[in-house]
Amino acid sequence: MADLVETAVNAGNFNTLVKAAKAANLIEILKSPGSFTLFAPTDEAFAKLPKGTLDSLLQDIPKLKKIVAYHIVSGDVRSDDLVQINEAETLEGSIVAIESADGKFKVNNANVLKTDILTDNGVIHIIDAVLMPAMVAGK
C-alpha cells in the first residue's frame, strides 16, 4: 500500500491539498510511519474558498500550516470509530466536531463524502469543504 501522500496524489483530486501540505512543510509528517487520519478536502472543496484565499494562504505559511494540520488527527480513526466519538483533537491543537447520523458523517461543517481509504500509515476520509480552525477563521 501507499502512504497518505502517495494515496492522495494517486487519487488525482487532492492536488491543492498536496500542494498546501508541501508549502506548509507537512509532507514529512504525512509520510512518517505514525498512524494518522487525514480529513482530505478535494480540489473542488478548495475551489469553494473565496477568491484569492488560497493564494494568500500560500504566502502565509504559518497560517497555512495551521489550516493543513487542522485536517490531520493522530491515530487510525476509521468510520467505526467516528460513530463513537463527537470530537477529535487535530495536529494543529484544536478540536474538530464529529457528527454521525444515518450512516453519514460531518466534520465541523464539512460532509464526509467517502470514508476509510486505507494507507500504509493511516486512513483518509474525503470531505467537501476546507476546515478552518477558529483562530484562523476569526481573523
Image (cartoon, rainbow, N blue to C red):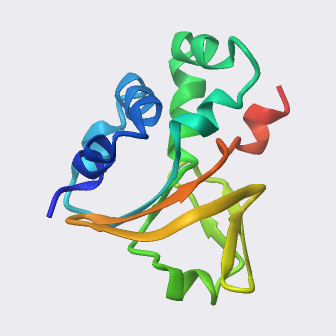
In the rendered image, residue 16, in percent from the top left (x then y), is placed at 46, 29
Residue in the foreground of this view, choosing between 32 and 99: 99
Q: Residue 56, percent across and down?
A: 63, 11
Which sits in the foreground, 50 or 95?
50
Q: Nearer the viewer, residue 136 or 122?
A: 122
> Looking at the picture, does residue 64 appear above or below residue 4?
above
Residue for point 69% across, 60% down: 111
User: Above or below — where is 2 with respect to 100?
Assistant: above
In the picture, measured across the screen, residue 35 lies left or right of residue 66, that is left
Q: How many marks?
A: 0
Toward the left, the furthest residue is 1
| Image quadrant containing the N terminus | bottom left
**How far across and down, in percent of the image, does residue 86 sit?**
72, 78
Instruction: Determine whether, in the image, residue 59 is placed left or right of residue 137.
Output: left
**Residue 35's quadrant in the figure?**
bottom left
Which quarter of the image is occupied by the C terminus? top right
Relative to 20, say whether 100 is above or below: below
Please, is residue 6 above or below residue 99 in the view?
above
Where does residue 116 sit, x and y in percent of width and height?
Answer: 42, 73
Q: Residue at x 60, y 19 (%)?
A: 54
